[in-house]
């Protein structure tokens, strides 16, 4: 019977092998996608995502933003969980009035 350390070494070798196979397959899939995009004239914008992978279009909230955070974050001030930046401002004892748009 194999020892624990031998089995761990085998497992690590298999994980490295699996990661390499994933990278190889990923490269093939990306090449295929690029070829189909070129063939059909599809752009990244047509896919509905920005370069960062975030959806382009409407935000979750239909309400207009009432507050702008220190890093440009927007918040409508509606019900529900407050964004992290709002909680941080309130925890410091500051008023949200200075962040009103």
Image (spheres, rainbow, N blue to C red):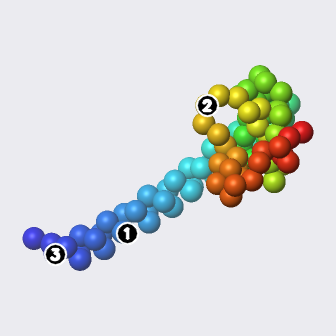
Kindly identify which residue carries mark 3: 3
Does 69 appear above or below 23?
above
Q: Residues within 10 Å of mark 1 (few under 14, many from 20)?
A: few
Mark sitting earlier along the chain (2/1)? 1
Which quadrant would the C terminus be assigned to in this image? top right
Look at discs 2 and 1 and give the one toward the viewer.
Answer: 2
Q: Residue at x 85, y 48 (%)?
A: 98
Nearer to the camera, 55 or 74: 74
Query: Is residue 68 visible to us here?
Result: no
Mark sitting earlier along the chain (3/1)? 3
How far apart marks 2 and 3 lie (CA) works out to 54 Å
Evaluate if marks 3 and 1 touch, with contact meaning CB atoms under 8 Å apart.
no
Nearer to the camera, 81 or 24: 81
| Residue 13's disc number | 1
Look at discs 2 and 3 and give the one toward the viewer.
Answer: 2
Kindly identify which residue carries mark 2: 80
Q: Position of residue 1 (x, y in %)?
A: 10, 70
């Amino acid at each position: 019977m194999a020892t624990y350390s031998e089995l761990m070494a085998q497992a690590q070798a298999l994980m490295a092998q699996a990661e390499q196979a994933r990278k190889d397959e990923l490269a093939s899939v990306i090449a295929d996608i690029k070829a189909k995009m070129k063939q059909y004239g599809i752009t990244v914008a047509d896919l509905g995502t920005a370069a960062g992978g975030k959806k382009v279009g409407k935000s979750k909230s239909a309400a207009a933003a009432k507050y702008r955070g220190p890093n440009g974050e927007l918040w409508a001030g509606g019900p529900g969980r407050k964004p992290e930046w709002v909680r941080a401002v309130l925890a410091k004892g500051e008023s949200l009035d200075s962040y009103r748009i």
